[in-house]
Amino acid sequence: MNNNKDLKCANKTVVPQIINQLEKYETNFKRADQYMYEKSNELSYLQYFSGYIYYYGKYVSLNIDKALIQLEKASNQNNSDAQYLLGVIFHNEKYISHDINKSIYYLTLSANQNNS
């Protein structure tokens, strides 16, 4: 029983700290999203990185819709890493339906820029 009491005590202190840190990350990414919309031509790598972390759920909650939006923006600016990741996403069927045509399209764009 002592373990349960210790766990409850830890939860009262640790969980709020974790939530506070997550809220800080979410605030930073909201700022990054706003900045990207304002200066999207200059920030294809930031868009790629944002799409990457949304897709893999790194530092933020996994969000496929946001990932695709950011990756497509970066891809439209000829970011070969974003094009490659989009090709993989449409091929893997992990979170969205398999679309071989989109997969080939994005992988070809990436390969044409010597990205493998």
Image (spheres, rainbow, N blue to C red):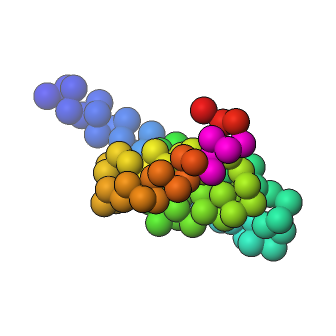
When asked about the image quadrant of residue 5, the answer is: top left
Name the residue nearer the viewer: 43 or 75: 75
Name the residue nearer the viewer: 12 or 33: 33
From what the image shows, is residue 30 above or below residue 57? below
Name the residue located 46 percent from the left edge and 45 percent from the top edge.
Answer: 88
Q: Is residue 114 left or right of residue 60?
A: right
Q: Is residue 103 left or right of residue 113?
A: left
The percent position of residue 73, horizontal first and vertical second, equals 66, 64
How many marks the image carries: the answer is 0
Residue 90 on the magenta span: no
Region rendered in magenta: 109-113
Name the residue nearer the viewer: 9 or 52: 52
The percent position of residue 91, horizontal first and vertical second, equals 38, 48
Residue most toward the top? 2
Residue most toward the left? 1
Name the residue nearer the viewer: 104 or 52: 104
The percent position of residue 10, horizontal first and vertical second, equals 37, 35
Residue 115: in sight, yes or no?
A: yes
From what the image shows, is residue 56 above or below residue 63? above
The percent position of residue 106, horizontal first and vertical second, equals 55, 53
Quadrant (top left/top right/bottom left/bottom right) for the C terminus: top right
Q: Is residue 102 left or right of residue 32?
A: left
Q: Main secondary structure of the magenta part?
A: helix
Quadrant (top left/top right/bottom left/bottom right) for the N terminus: top left
Name the residue located 70 percent from the left edge and 36 percent from the top edge.
Answer: 114
Residue 32: in sight, yes or no?
A: no
Residue 112 on the magenta span: yes
